Image (cartoon, helix red, strand yellow):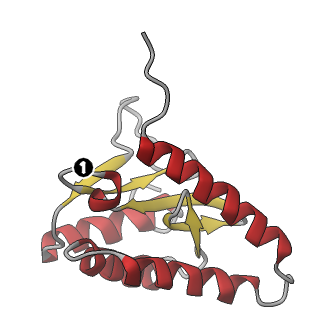
Amino acid sequence: MPQGFSEQERAAMKERAAELKKEAARPRGGKAAADELDVLAKIAEMEQPDRAVAERLHAIVTATAPELAPKLWYGQPAYARKGKVVCFFRSGRVDKERYSSFGFTTEAGLDDPSGLWPTAYAVTELTPEAEEAITALVKRAVGTGAGS
């Protein structure tokens, strides 16, 4: 028997509805800056170690793909091209999971000829190797990396 949505899922849906309402009310001129401030404020609210991971991911994504605009998506940081989310961070603490995740939507150019590819990655810390991998994935997702 289906249980319905979890408490975290219901909270995320309410946050998304509030985000859409807030976006619609914003004047177009300062929307990008306001969206980024919302993302930075959400990251600042996170508990450690998620905050440190989210801060570093934000720096990596914005430096690697400046064409992606930071915005909130279901109450979590995301990065969009022309309004459509390409990649996102999910806090494990907020989702009550043992790890956070960094994922990609169907807008990301990660398709593999094998017909199989990952769309999300568990993140517990950002080692130099993990940062390199994320940088390469973001480049590929936006069409500027090897294999794009």
What residue do we see at 69% from left, 83% from top? 32
Asked whether, in this view, residue 61 is left or right of residue 10, the answer is: left
Q: Mark 1 sits on what residue?
A: 97
Quarter of the figure with residue 126: bottom left
Specify whether 51 is left or right of 103. Answer: left
Secondary structure type for disc 1: loop
Q: Nearer the viewer, residue 71 or 6?
A: 6
Q: Amino acid at mark 1?
A: Glu
Could you tell me residue 117's position as x and y percent? Answer: 35, 39
Using the rendered view, name the quadrant where residue 49 is placed: bottom left
Please tell me which residue is depicted at 44% across the width and 79% down the height of the picture: 64
Outermost residue to the top? 1
Q: Left of 43 or right of it: where is 48? A: left
Q: Position of residue 127 (x, y in %)?
A: 13, 74
Q: Position of residue 129 (x, y in %)?
A: 14, 70
- Which residue is at 46% across, 42% downward? 111
Residue 145 in sight from this viewpoint: no
Q: Does residue 86 appear in this view?
A: yes
**Which residue is located at x 28 percent, y 57 percent?**
92
Q: Name the image quarter holding the N terminus.
A: top left
Q: Residues within 10 Å of mark 1 (few under 14, many from 20)?
A: few
Task: Give the total number of marks visible in the rendering.
Answer: 1
Q: Is residue 116 above or below residue 81?
A: above
Corner quadrant of residue 145: bottom left
- Image height of 115 relative to 11, above or below: above
